[in-house]
Image (cartoon, rainbow, N blue to C red):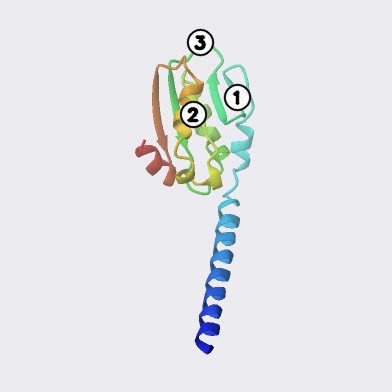
Amino acid sequence: MRRNKWLAGIGIAFFTVMILATGGFIYWANNPLPAQPAAINSLQSDAIVQIKTDPWYQFSPTEGSPQIGLILYPGGRVEALAYAPTARAIAEHGFLVVLPEMRLNLAVFSPDITEEIIASYPDIDTWAIGGHSLGGAMAARY
């Protein structure tokens, strides 16, 4: 009888720790490093670059139709918006740039986002995929 109570206590402790760890991970993952003010300021369309924010950040040149697109995966726990200045600079040279937001701010939880993005832009002939840190590792797996 004592053994059963002891095992039950161990089981309850184990599940309590697992629930707390899972909740802690979700809280941690959902609080990414915020974008700097310069990145937020880069999110304004102008005569050179048009910006859309839904369903992902899209930077495209206002003149001509880009034939090459870049999907840029953000680093782990970094807001996709943080890469807006880089995306804008690339788009200024005539390329479409897409910055997807990842589930739980980790690219490992959005493995199919590339296919979804490519399917959304049938006019783009050539795609490049890259990323920073964990985003770069996941982009390389594509």
Q: CA distance from mark 1 to mark 2?
A: 19 Å
Q: Quick one: label 3, few (<14), some, or many (20+) residues within 10 Å? A: few
Disc 2 designates what residue?
A: 116
- The reply to whether the C-beta atoms of the residues labelled 3 and 2 are less than 8 Å apart is no
Q: Secondary structure at mark 3?
A: loop
Q: Residue at x 51, y 29 (%)?
A: 98
Task: Categorize mark 1 by other alpha carbons within 10 Å: few (<14), some (14-19), many (20+).
Answer: many
Q: Which residue is at 35% across, 39% downward?
A: 141
Residue lying at 57% horizontally and 56% vertically, measured from the top left: 28
Identify the element where label 1 is drawn.
strand
| Dot 1 or dot 3, earlier in sequence | 1
The type of residue carrying mark 1 is: Ile
Give the residue number, with chain letter if any, for mark 1. 51
Secondary structure found at label 2 = helix
Residue placed furthest toward the front: 1
Q: Is residue 68 above or below residue 138?
A: above
What is the x, y in percent for residue 140? 35, 38
Q: CA distance from mark 3 to mark 2?
A: 24 Å
The residue indicated by pointer 3 is: 64
Identity of the residue drawn at 59% across and 37% down: 39
Say which label, 3 or 2, has the lower sequence index: 3
